[in-house]
Amino acid sequence: MAEFFLVSEPHAMMCPFCRDGETKVIDSRASQDFVIRRRRQCLSCERRFTTYEKIEESPLKVIKKDGTRVPFDREKIRSGLEKACYKRSISADAIEAVICSIEAGVYGEFEREVPSRSIGEMVVDALRDIDQVAFVRFASVYREFKDVNDFVEELGPMLKGEATRR
């Protein structure tokens, strides 16, 4: 189970303008996943500002092929997707949706550690449905294709699927 930590005093916030420590919360709203947006007003200078409160989780580690462990980083997924989708008609919103979906899947399925292979397979599965060229680009690097036979083997099921749809 993931560990969550919250700031114990949600109203103790230093004013960014006068640095006074007394503020009041005017409005609170949930914005994105597990993020609370708070509108605050300084009791000293009366200026208003916005803060965001986020749950701090114990960091998820990715187990690499060589057994090393590194912190989970959604930007690495973005980098791989952008390389695979280079010069393809795939919007930035579509890429962001894939990243969010994979991140949600990783945090939903794994608690403290996730094998890099699992993340790679999630990316491959997502790209298979979005764009076949991006799929092949990513799969060729991720699965370390050695020669043309590796490409043919990967494309076989996809090509058979195309033939049955016609």
Image (cartoon, rainbow, N blue to C red):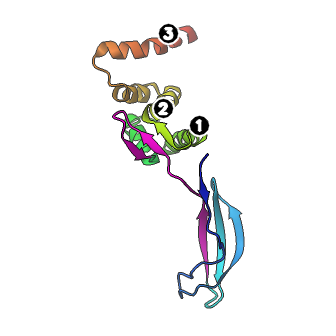
Q: Earlier in the sequence, mark 3 or mark 1?
A: 1
Q: Residues within 10 Å of mark 2 (few under 14, many from 20)?
A: some
Q: Is residue 90 visible?
A: no
* Residue found 66% across the figure and 88% down from its top: 43
Q: Which residue is mark 1?
A: 109
Check disc 3 and report its element: helix, strand or loop: helix
Q: CB atoms at circles 2 and 3 under 8 Å apart? A: no
Which image quarter: residue 26?
A: bottom right
Please name the residue that numbered disc 2 is placed on. 118
Name of the residue lying farthest toward the bottom = 44
**Mark 2 residue element:** helix
Question: Which residue carries the number 3 mark?
Answer: 160
Could you tell me residue 85's position as x and y percent? 41, 36
**Residue 95 against residue 32 in the figure, above or below:** above
Callout 1 crowding tier (Cα within 10 Å): few <14, some 14–19, many ≥20? few
Q: Is residue 27 above or below residue 141?
A: below
> Callout 2, which amino acid?
Ser
Depth check, front residue: 131 or 11: 11
Callout 3 amino acid: Lys
Q: Is residue 70 visible?
A: yes
* Residues shaded magenta: 48-71
